[in-house]
Image (spheres, grey):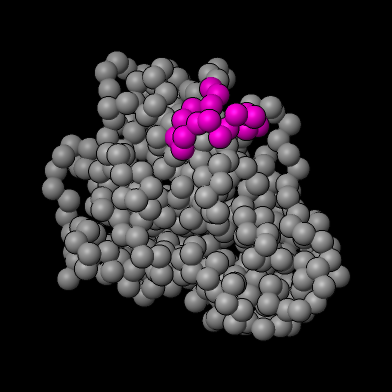
């Protein structure tokens, strides 16, 4: 949860790093590959289409009594339009009949493949398990995608949106789950909200056939680049998360964002230290460090860098969600409220019903619980077919 508070410094670090003219020391550092062959893309990946199920398995040992759990490997698309294989975990609660489907995007904020939801759902590492229990208790099926993709590209929000939509397609196409006719809702907070928001903004063009009835997202950093400008080169307890964003974006855009061009010796040491780390270790490794320690100064107006980050900023992306939106934000959130409200206003102006809820007295952490409870009721009303409320002006 603290992650999105510090995406700011991550983007600032990238801006300095990629625009220098120093020679490249080495390319992007990718995570240690999965040891489980289930995750590997088949050789005939090009013969399938986005959302097609490539491989499936049932998970017998899990923490949801009576529910049936599958993991699906499916075809998705990376930021350059190329085919990739991604994973979603589908949980169907007990009871016959059809179940509405909620795609839940957790705040992963990590660089190691072992940190992905398909692992942490089963080893106690997923911090949002209570939210999933609330969804299942309502009789809703849940799909939890590994929305950072096959290289844990933390920060690549458009990629996360495409994986989310293709994960929903896969869950609905997977006949044993019985979700082919299910209406769909999407939920995410903070880092998960970036993928959720992009899935909503991309859906009309990327996956127009999906019956998405509602999008609930909270604490959304709609333009991390703008946030970076306000940070400066000051020590910060969450510097590691920002540095991890720089690494994740380089993984997704290795040609456009050669991070190694500007790293200092300390920066290379930091990159090696956190290349396979999960969120808590990333925070610990980077606490109190600064951009100036890790990067050589350079030009901050590189046009390739700017276009890359614009492509991953909801405030700038021209696509508009067509499904109704419930969006919440802490009144004292460290993620800028005004940028989130301006983006919601853009959606309102395009005719999308938006209920924007500012939760008084809460910051980025404490806004999670009340907003999530509100989101559950709001999603339930969408599944019931009730008209979507709006406070658009």
Q: Is residue 247 visible?
A: yes
Total labels: the figure holds: 0
Q: Residue at x 42, y 61 (%)?
A: 219
Quarter of the image that includes the C terminus: bottom left
Residue 273 lies, with reference to residue 266, above or below; the image says: above
Of residue 377 and residue 144, the one placed in the foreground of this image is 144
Residue 121 lies, with reference to residue 152, above or below; the image says: above
Q: Residue at x 51, y 40 (%)?
A: 76
287 with respect to 192 (left or right): right
Q: Is residue 238 visible?
A: no
Question: Measured from the top left, where is residue 53 in percent x and y?
Answer: 49, 27
Residue 111 lies, with reference to residue 210, above or below; the image says: below
Q: Which residues are magenta?
A: 39-56
Q: Quadrant of residue 283?
A: bottom right
Question: Measured from the top left, where is residue 279 in percent x and y?
Answer: 64, 52
Q: Quadrant of residue 29?
A: bottom right
Q: Is residue 42 magenta?
A: yes
Question: Measured from the top left, where is residue 120 in percent x and y?
Answer: 60, 37
Q: Residue at x 19, y 66 (%)?
A: 392
Check the image and name the residue furthest to the left: 387
Check the image and name the residue furthest to the right: 265
Q: Is residue 350 magenta?
A: no
Q: Quadrant of residue 287?
A: bottom right
264 with respect to 344 (left or right): right
Q: Residue at x 82, y 61 (%)?
A: 26
Question: Measured from the top left, where is residue 1 in percent x and y?
Answer: 53, 56
């Amino acid at each position: 949860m603290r992650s999105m508070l510090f995406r700011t410094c991550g983007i600032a670090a990238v801006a300095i790093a990629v625009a220098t003219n120093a020679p490249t020391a080495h390319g992007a550092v990718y995570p240690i590959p999965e040891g489980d062959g289930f995750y590997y893309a088949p050789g005939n990946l090009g013969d399938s289409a986005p959302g097609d199920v490539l491989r499936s398995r049932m998970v017998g040992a899990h923490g949801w009594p009576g529910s049936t759990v599958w993991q699906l490997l499916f075809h998705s698309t990376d930021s350059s339009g190329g085919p990739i294989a991604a994973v979603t975990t589908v949980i169907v609660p007990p009871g016959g009949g059809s179940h509405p489907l909620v795609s839940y995007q957790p705040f992963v904020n990590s660089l190691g493949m072992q940190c992905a939801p398909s692992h942490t759902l089963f080893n106690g590492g997923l911090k949002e398990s209570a939210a999933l229990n609330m969804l299942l208790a309502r009789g809703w099926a849940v799909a939890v995608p590994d929305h950072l993709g096959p290289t844990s590209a933390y920060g690549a929000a458009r990629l996360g949106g495409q994986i989310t939509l293709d994960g929903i397609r896969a869950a609905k196409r997977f006949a044993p789950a019985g979700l082919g006719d299910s209406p769909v809702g999407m939920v995410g907070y903070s880092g998960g909200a970036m993928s959720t928001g992009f899935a909503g903004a991309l859906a009309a063009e990327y996956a127009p056939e999906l019956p998405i009835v509602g999008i609930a997202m909270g604490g959304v950093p709609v333009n991390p680049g703008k946030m970076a400008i306000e940070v400066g080169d000051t020590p910060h307890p969450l510097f590691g998360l920002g540095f991890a964003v720089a690494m994740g974006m380089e993984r997704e855009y290795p040609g456009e964002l050669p991070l190694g061009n500007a790293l200092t010796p300390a920066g290379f040491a930091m990159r090696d230290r956190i290349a396979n780390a999960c969120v808590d270790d990333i925070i610990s490794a980077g606490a109190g460090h600064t951009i100036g320690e890790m990067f050589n100064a350079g030009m901050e107006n590189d046009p390739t860098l700017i276009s890359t980050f614009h492509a991953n900023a909801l405030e700038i992306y021209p696509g508009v969600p067509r499904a109704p939106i419930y969006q919440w934000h802490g009144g004292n959130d460290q993620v800028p409220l005004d940028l989130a409200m301006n983006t919601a206003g853009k959606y309102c102006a395009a005719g999308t019903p938006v209920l924007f809820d500012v939760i008084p007295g809460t910051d980025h952490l404490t806004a999670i619980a009340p907003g999530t409870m509100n989101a559950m009721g709001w999603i339930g009303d969408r599944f019931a077919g009730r008209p979507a409320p709006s406070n658009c002006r």
